[in-house]
Amino acid sequence: MAEFLTRIQVEGTAAIIRNRSRYQPTVGIILGSGLNDVANAVQNADVIPTSQIPHWPTSTVPGHKGRLLLGRLEGKVVLVLQGRTHFYEGYNMDQITLPVRVMHILGIRTLILTNAAGGINPSFHTGDLMLIKDHINLPGMAGANPLRGPNDASFGPRFPDMTEPYDAQLRQIAHDQARAAGFETREGVYAFVAGPSFETPAELRYLHGIGADAVGMSTAPEVVVARHAGMRVLGISTITNMAKLHPEVGDVTSHEEVLEVGQQVLPRLTALLHGVIRHLPTAVDEAETA
Ligand code: HPA
């Protein structure tokens, strides 16, 4: 397939989804590794396997299901993507960020992304939830930015501002809702790496040195595309493992560990998402999608 998807192609994809669902979503949710079950609470969902959607990349990773759910959650109409795809699977940046563009065309103006991440900040613990306040898009800075290529001004500007990639108001709502549910959230900088190999100790010490609190293999490209289109973004990292900056003999990082901790965190992550969605400033949402 061509490297860059055109507006016509993205609109065609959005039209298929529109035709297959009764709902007009205003909130988009992209779920990360091992976190798919958060979508079980979506009521009366229309379910669309992503394999049936043109141009849509299909997930090849265990723990990623590959389907869209449209339905109600906490009084809002949401579109949930179970099974995001990653750059390391071999897809190009246009493909992995297609869901975000489609969501925008469907009228979604608030995007919530979750991911599994390795904790770099030494005060973090396995099982912590970190609200992303900023990111370091290492592949993006080195050339694999999802906006590389012709800019279609109907999506957004050639040189979009990234001063506040993650919405401060949504972050505050998330902090408050976590507290109301009886736990504290962390906050920090997420470093996006291409993967799929986990980082070496020297790479982790480098990431620590440049200001990263957590590291993972997703999210930043989707956020760049969402901000390009002016969407409000909330990013939540589940710290599934502590990165080994100074490993001891026998230390390893595995995908199984990532999935296992993801499962343990699900009740808290679910409570957090419910609280945030219940308290989203709907007036802003509706005004923007009208
Ligand atoms: N590194 C990169 N990606 C990850 C990690 C990690 O330690 N844990 C979960 N996703």
Image: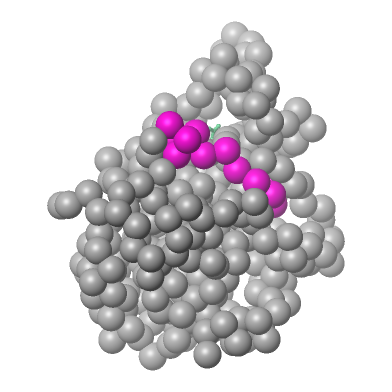
Residue 22 picture quarter: bottom left
Whether residue 139 is visible to the viewer of this picture, yes or no, is: yes
Could you say where residue 246 lies in the image, as x and y percent from the top left? Answer: 65, 13
283 over 264 or under it: above or below: below
Q: Within the magenta stretch, is there residue 136?
A: yes
Q: Residue furthest left?
A: 1
Residue at horizontal 17 percent and vertical 52 percent from the top: 2
Residue at horizontal 47 percent and vertical 35 percent from the top: 141
Is residue 126 toward the left or the right of residue 200 in the image?
right
Is residue 187 toward the left or the right of residue 116 in the image?
right
Residue at horizontal 57 percent and vertical 14 percent from the top: 202
Could you say where residue 225 lies in the image, as x and y percent from the top left? Answer: 45, 57
187 over 78 or under it: above or below: above
Magenta segment: 130-142
Residue at horizontal 60 percent and vertical 20 percent from the top: 206
Question: Toward the viewer: 68 or 10?
Answer: 10
Q: Magenta residues: mostly which secondary structure?
A: strand
